[in-house]
Amino acid sequence: MTFIPKPASDTQSKKADKFTPLKPAFRNRQYGSEFNTWELSLLKEFTYAKKSTTPSVSGTVVYDGKLGRNRFLLIPAAHLPQDYIICECPPDVAIPANLSYVTITGQKRPFYDYWALIVDNIVSAKINQPIKPEIDFKEFQQQLFLPWSGIFSPQKDLLAFEFVSSPPLLNMGQAGGLSITLYDESKHHQTHKLLKYFYDLIPQDIAQGKSGNLTIPELAAEQPLSPYTWQFRSFSADKPLNQHLVTFLDRRAPKRLSKGLSELSIGLGSRRNQPRSIYDPPLRLVDQPAILERSAEMHPMRFDPPLDVTKYILTMQMLFPTIGKTQADLNTTLEKASQKIINVAEKYDLPKEVQRHGLFDANYYGKPQSSLRLALSSARSQQITTVDDTLVFKAIEDFYVKNIENVFEAWEDLFTPGGVEMVSLSEFDRQVLKFITEKETNDLGVSYFLLSEKFALESSREIELRRAIQRLLSEGKIRESSYQIYRAIPFIQ
C-alpha cells in the first residue's frame, strides 16, 4: 500500500517560502567585503606592526581598569576590535585616556602563553590613512532606498542626511546628529514602515547602541567596548514625546550624550498628513519636517541589506567638518544664517505670528543651528573639511527653502490666522521688548546683564524678567542670537 503525503496547506507553504534577510554585521565582521578599503589598510598596518620585537604601533586605547590597573588594550580603531595588543605601563608611564588614538612604542615581553607590549612611550596621533567612502552620496541614496519608489528631493536628501549625520557642535556644547519629523500623505500609511525599514537596515549593535565585549582568551577575560559613536532612533510623532526626547531636541541647553555616543539622529513618524499646529513639538523641535509623498511605496523585494550602506555610514562618522576655523567664525556664520532665515520668512505673505515660530525660529538654537547641521551633513557627504558661509547658504537654499515650498503647498491651511494662536503682550513684556529694540545695534544685541540692570535691580524681579524673556522668545517677538544675547525680530508690529 502506498501512502500519499497530505498536501501542504497554504499556511505551511507560506512559512516554508518566507524569506529572512541577513542582519548586517558591525562588531563581528569577518570577511573582506564587509570592510571599507581604508579599514582593511588599518587592520593590515596594525597586524604588520605587531610582528616587530620592538613595535611602534598606532591605534585606539580601550581602558576601564578591568584588565588591571596598569593594563589596557590597543585596537586598530575605535570601531575595529578585530585585532588587539595587550599593553602594560610601567609605574612612571601614565595610561592614556579611553578611546584616545595614540602611537605606542615598547618592548615585547612573554607571559606564559601570551605576550604583552611593555610601553616605553606614548604620543597622541591621528589616523594617517585617507578616509574615503567607496560610493558617493547619490549611490548611497540609491542603496538606502532600494525597495522604495516615489520619494524625491529634498525629502530624500533630508532622510539620507540622518544617516550621514552631523558632527557635534563642540563650541556650542551640542551633540551631533539630525532630527526629522516625517508626515504621511502616502496611500497606505507608509511612514512607520519606512522608519522600521531604516532601523532594520542598520546593524543592530549600532541601532540599539550596544556596547559589546571583546574576548581576551590570553587573560580569560572579556573587555567591554564602547558603543558606536552614532545611533539612529525612531519615535511616533502622534504620541506625547517623552521628556528625555524633548530635552534632547531642545537645542537651547548644552548636552552631551553618554557612553561614548556623540551623534544621535532622530526620526519621528506621524500618520497625520500635517502637524496639529505650528506649535506642535514634533514640528517645532526638529531640524526639519518632511512629507512622505502620496507616490511613496515600498515594493516587495527579497534582498539582504546592502553592505555598502553600512560601510558608507561607518566612513561618514570618521569625517569631522567644522564651521569655519574659530569660535568667531561660528558666531558670525550663525548670525548670517539667522538673518537668512528672517529674510526667507519675509518673502511669504503669512500672518506675522507664523513668521516667528517653528519653521522660522531665528534664535541661534533654532533654524540657524539646524542650517549649520544640514551644511555639515552636506560637507561630510562631499568630504569637505571646512564649511564656509557659501556652503551654509547653499544648504539653506537646497534643503531648507525647497522643503518649505513643499510644506506650504501641502499645509496651506496651517499658515492662516485660523491656525495661529494670537498672543498679546503684558505691559512689562512691552517694556522689555522696547528696551531691546532701542538698545540693539546693527552689530550687537542686548545682553541679559543690561536687561537685569534695567529691570531687575531687586532680586525679586529677576524671576519676572526671566519669565518675560521666555514669553517674548516663545511668542517670536525676540530671538536669542547667542547665549543670553537678545535681538528684536525686525518684522514685529
Image (cartoon, helix red, strand yellow):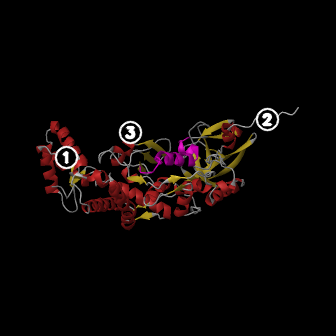
Stretch in magenta: 184-210
- Neighbor class of circle 3 (other Cα within 10 Å; few <14, some 14-19, many 20+) is some
Mark 1 and mark 3: Cα distance apart in space: 25 Å
| Magenta stretch holds residue 191 | yes
Alpha carbons under labels 2 and 1: distance apart = 75 Å
Q: Secondary structure at mark 1?
A: loop
Q: How far apart are the alpha carbons under marks 3 and 2?
A: 55 Å
Outermost residue on the right side: it is 1
Along the line of sight, which residue is nearer the eye, 182 or 430? 182
At label 2, the amino acid type is: Pro
Residue ID for mark 1: 422
User: Where does the image place residue 89, in percent across and percent down from the top left?
Assistant: 61, 44
Q: Indicate left or right for 70 with 296 as reference.
A: right
Quadrant of the rendering where the N terminus is positioned:
top right
Amino acid type, mark 3:
Leu
Residue at 53% over, 55% down: 148
Q: Which mark is residue 5?
A: 2
Disc 1 to disc 3: CB gap under 8 Å: no
Kindly identify the amino acid type of the residue bearing the numbered disc 1. Answer: Met
Q: Which mark is residue 241?
A: 3
- Identify the mark nearer the N-term, 1 or 3: 3
- Identify the mark nearer the N-term, 2 or 1: 2
| Dot 1 crowding, Cα within 10 Å, few <14, some 14–19, many 20+ | few
57 or 282: nearer the viewer:
282
Instruction: Answer above or below: position of 15 versus 172.
Output: above
**Residue 385 can be seen in this image:** yes
**Residue density around tag 2, few if under 14, some if 14–19, many if 20 or more, within 10 Å:** few
Image mark for residue 81: none
Which element type, helix, strand or loop, lies under badge 2?
A: loop
Decide which of 384, 299 is in the foreground and name it: 299
Within the image, what quadrant is residue 443 found in?
Answer: bottom left
